[in-house]
Structures are given as structure tokens and as C-alpha cells.
Image (cartoon, rainbow, N blue to C red):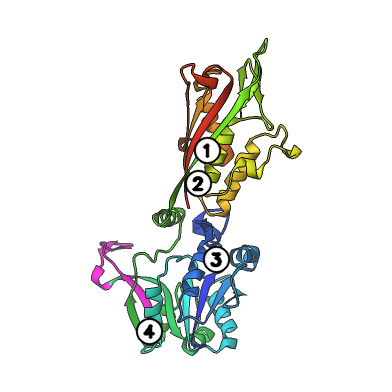
Amino acid sequence: MNNVVLIMAAGNSVRFAADLPKQYNKVNGKTLLRWAIEAFLQNKLIDKIVVVINEEHLHFYENSTEDIGNMLEYTLGGDTRKKSVASGLQYLQKFNPVNVLIHDAARPLVSQKLINRVVEGLDICEAVDVGLQAVDTIKYEKPDGIEVLEREKVYATQTPQGFKFETISTLHQNIQGDYTDDISICLENQINIKRIEGERSNIKITNWSDFEYFKFIKKENKVYRTGLGTDVHRFSEFLESDVMIKICGIEVAHNQLIIAHSDGDVGFHAITEALLGAMALGNIGQIFPDNDGRYKNMDSAHFLIYARNELRKLCCEIVNIDLTIICEKPRIMPHSQRMRKNIADVLEIEIYQVSVKATTTEKMGFLGNQNGIAAQAICTVIS
């Protein structure tokens, strides 16, 4: 093989402060590791990708890569970066590659152009360093004060770094101490190195703010889709005393019952229809037919949760929901804040993303005559 990639993903991400190691946190339905892998999968110069993982993360890795074919393999790393790289290089011996690119899983935005430039650099040098020229004023804090460095002579190292395979393998067999990158080993051993300019987009996800910035970048390329949902239910005859009916999952006192197969929650039904419509996923009647006894008197939150989960399968996020409930009675607005919160809780979004309004038909038509209740919802999602 000519060119293989070693992706370093064995770290525990101590600085990231999250439940999952950072390489397994998702953006748009893909882990950071998956973003990095896919960049190299798309490159025609790359023959093989091997990921170095932590044995304790094996199930995370398998869930992230289960649908990728034979071009991808993994091996287990050690408790330091040096040991993990050495383990990865040892595993690569069986492929007898000419060149190896070593990349951090925490850099999910590596470009095809940068990969190509690293590979091309190995035609004339034993190692290729990727460095982003400093543009800010750089200061060095010393025990006796602060020194301003010449920023023209300072650059920040990025990955992938490229190496002749035999060169870096031999160096790793003999090094002492630990290193934060592999070019440092080459510098210490007077290896011929070519430095190419990095890319500002090739960010490294180190802490949570980096992760939030990455999510912001990826949203710029997403598509906004809007769905419209409508639901109408009849009221029963007037009762002698009030009963509780459900609207947006909240019990509201009214002197009529809602006639429906399920619990007749027009608010939840309209929002469900809008979410399904935004992604062309059908409607409630198709998915939960009213001639199926399983859905008799069912809590309509079940339908809303179904729509939420289907959107997630498609890597969609809800932007906002605008719901209007139409009836003469009961009065809706005294309950609107509780309704907003309940909708947000069921969909696991923020309350500011949900609007609940109400209107009447000025006593006109069947709604004006209090023969029924209706709702309309408009929902926007990012896909």
C-alpha cells in the first residue's frame, strides 16, 4: 500500500468535561471520530485507515463505524499518546505502507486539499508538518516576566502529519519520554521535514466551547424545512358540570368532552402532523390508524415522541414550533405557559422554541357554535 492513515482516538478527553469521550460526541448525527474518518474515506490517495482506540471505548467505536467497509480497521492503544502511536504503527506493519498520515480524531474538519498536500509533500521529504501561521500577538510567560514572541516565526501545529512509514516506525522503537506530536520526534532526530501551511477550518476540539463552535459551523450547511399540521375534534353535548380535557398534555376544565379515538389532544396532534410533514414522513392517520384498538384512549404524547424520534433518526433538529388553538371555550391563554413547557419537555427542546397562541372564529361556524376545537401548527426543522 502507498498511503495509510492512523487516527488517534484512544484518549479519555479529561479537558472536555462530558459524559462521553469527546471523539464519540455527535454533531448532525455523526461522532467527531466519524467526521474525521469520512474525510479520509473520500480521498482517493488513501488506501487504508486504522483507528487507535481505548479498549474501554470499543462499544462506542463499533456504534460509530458499524456500516463502514473493509477500508477501516482498529487497534488498541496505550495509556499515553506515544504508546498509542507505537501500537498503531506496529499494527500497520502488515500492510507494508510507503507513507503514513497520523491524525487526531479531535480534528473533524480536515479538508481533501490538506490531505492531498501532505501526501504530495512526502514525495520530497521524510516528514511533513502542518502548521498554521500565528496572526495574534503571542506572549511567553516566564518566571521573571512576560516575553512577546515574534509571531512571524511561530505557528500552531495541526494534523494530519505525514511520514515515511519506515522512518517514523524506527524512531518510535527507540524514543524515550513522551511527545505531544510526532514531528517533535523527527526534529530531535534531524529528519528532513517539510512544513506546509495549515487551515483555519481544521480546528481541534479540545473543550466544550470548541464543540459548540463546530456545531455552529455545521449548521451553516444545513437545510431548513417547514411543516404544517392541522387537527380538529368534535365536542360532546354540554355537560352539567366540568370535566378535564387534554390540550397539549395539560388538563383543562371544560363542560364538554372531546370525541376522539385517542385522548383527542388537538395541540399534540397538530404539532405531530407538522413535524412529520416537515420531513415528508406521513401523518398520524397513516401511522396510528383510528381503527386500531391499540391506540384507543392513548395519551397523545406517544405520537409526539414518535415524531421526535423519527426526526432524530434523520439527524434533524427542531428550530421552532408555533401552535394556534382555535375555539370559543375553554379559554386557552391562562394555560399557555404550562402548555409551552410541556411541549418543550416532551420534545426535549427549550421553551423559547415553542409558541402557543389561541383565537376564536367570532362565534361563526361549528367552532363558533362550540361544536368542536381545532389547532394549527407550523414547525421548522434543520436537516
Q: N-terminal of the two: label 1 or label 2?
A: 1
Comparing labels 4 and 3, the label whose residue is closer to the camera: 4
Q: Secondary structure at mark 4?
A: helix
**Image quadrant assignment for residue 195:** bottom left
Residue sitting nearer the eye, 110 or 52: 110
Comparing labels 2 and 3, the label whose residue is closer to the camera: 2
Q: N-terminal of the two: label 4 or label 3?
A: 3
Q: N-terminal of the two: label 4 or label 2?
A: 4
Q: Residues within 10 Å of mark 2 (few under 14, many from 20)?
A: many
Q: N-terminal of the two: label 4 or label 1?
A: 4
Position of residue 164 measured from the top left corner of the image (x, y, whole percent): 45, 87
- Relative horizontal placement of residue 242, taking residue 92 as reference (left or right): right
Circles 4 and 1, Cβ within 8 Å, touching? The answer is no
Q: CA distance from mark 4 to mark 3?
A: 29 Å
Q: CA distance from mark 4 to mark 2?
A: 45 Å
Relative to 80, say whether 170 is above or below: below
Q: Secondary structure at mark 2?
A: helix
Name the residue type under label 1: Gly
Q: Which residue is mark 2?
A: 278
Q: N-terminal of the two: label 3 or label 1?
A: 3
Name the residue type under label 4: Glu
Q: Which residue is mark 4?
A: 120
Find residue 11 and name its label. 3
Q: Which residue is mark 1?
A: 229
Q: Is residue 300 magenta?
A: no
